[in-house]
Image (tube, grey):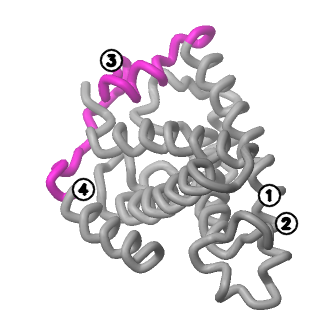
Amino acid sequence: MKIWDIAIRLFHWTLVVVFIMAAYSAFQDKFGIYADMHTYAGVTILILMVWRILWGLVGSETARFSQFVRGPQAIKGYLQHGDAAKCAGHNPLGALSVVAMLVLLLAQAVMGLFATDDIFFSGPLSDQAGGWAGTLTRWHKQLGLVLIGLAALHVLVVLYYSVVKKAGLLRAMISGTKPAAKRAPVLKSSWLALAIFVPLASGLWYAILG
C-alpha cells in the first residue's frame, strides 16, 4: 500500500543531491563555480526545510509531525518490542532522527546565509551579520562536520534496516509503497504540495538572492 506521497519522496531525494553538493563544495576553494554551488545548494536546503516543516503540519498523514513524533514511552516500547517493517511511516526512534536532521539542517542553512571567510566567500546576507559573522561562520563549519557524520550514520542505519531487518525502508522511499503496513495512511494531493512549494521557493529565493 502507498505510504509516502510523491512530494515527500521528491523532497528526500532532492535533499540528498543538494546536501552532497553543499558538502562537496564546502571543501573546495570558495570562488567561482564552487562558491556558487555552495550558495545555491544552501539556499535550496533552506527552502526544502521550510517546506518540509509546513508539510509536516498540513500534509499527508505519514508526513505530519503529530502522527509520528512520539514520547519516551513509545520509543522505549519500540526498542523493546517494535518492528520497523510494520510501521506505516517513521517508527518512533526514526522520528527523532527526522526532527533532529530538520532542526540541524535548518540551523545550518540559516547560519550559512551570514557566514564569510573574509577573503573569497561570503553568504548572501553576511553584510547583515555584524559582529556575529565570525561566530556564525565558526558554528557553520562545525555543524557541517556534524551533519556529514549524521548523514553517514543515517545511511548505515537505513541499510541495516533494509538489508538485515528486511524493513524495506529504502524501497519504500523510492516506490512510495510498503507491503507490511497495517493500514493505508491518508495522503494529500501532490497539487497541494506544489501550491505550497512554488510560492515559498520563489519568495525565499528572491528575498535571499534577488
Pointers 1 and 2 in contact (C-beta within 8 Å): yes
In the picture, residue 28 is in which quadrant?
top right
Give me the disc on residue 179: 3
Secondary structure beneath label 2:
helix
Give me the disc on residue 120: none
Pointers 3 and 2 in contact (C-beta within 8 Å): no
Q: Position of residue 155 (x, y in %)?
A: 63, 27
Q: Which residues are magenta?
A: 163-192
Q: Main secondary structure of the magenta part?
A: loop
| Alpha carbon distance from label 4 to label 3 | 25 Å
Q: Amino acid at mark 3?
A: Pro
* In the image, residue 200 lies in the stretch drawn in magenta: no
Question: Nearer the viewer's eye, disc 4 or disc 1?
Answer: 1
The residue at the far front in this view is 32
Which of the two discs, 4 and 2, labels the residue nearer the N terminus? 2
Q: Is residue 134 left or right of residue 56?
A: right
- Residue located at (41% from left, 19% from top): 171
| Alpha carbon distance from label 4 to label 1 | 32 Å
Residue, disc 4: 193
Q: Residues within 10 Å of mark 1 (few under 14, many from 20)?
A: some
In the picture, residue 124 is in which quadrant?
bottom right
Residue, disc 1: 141
In the picture, residue 210 is in which quadrant?
bottom left
Give me the disc on residue 138: 2
- Residue located at (29% from left, 45% from top): 7
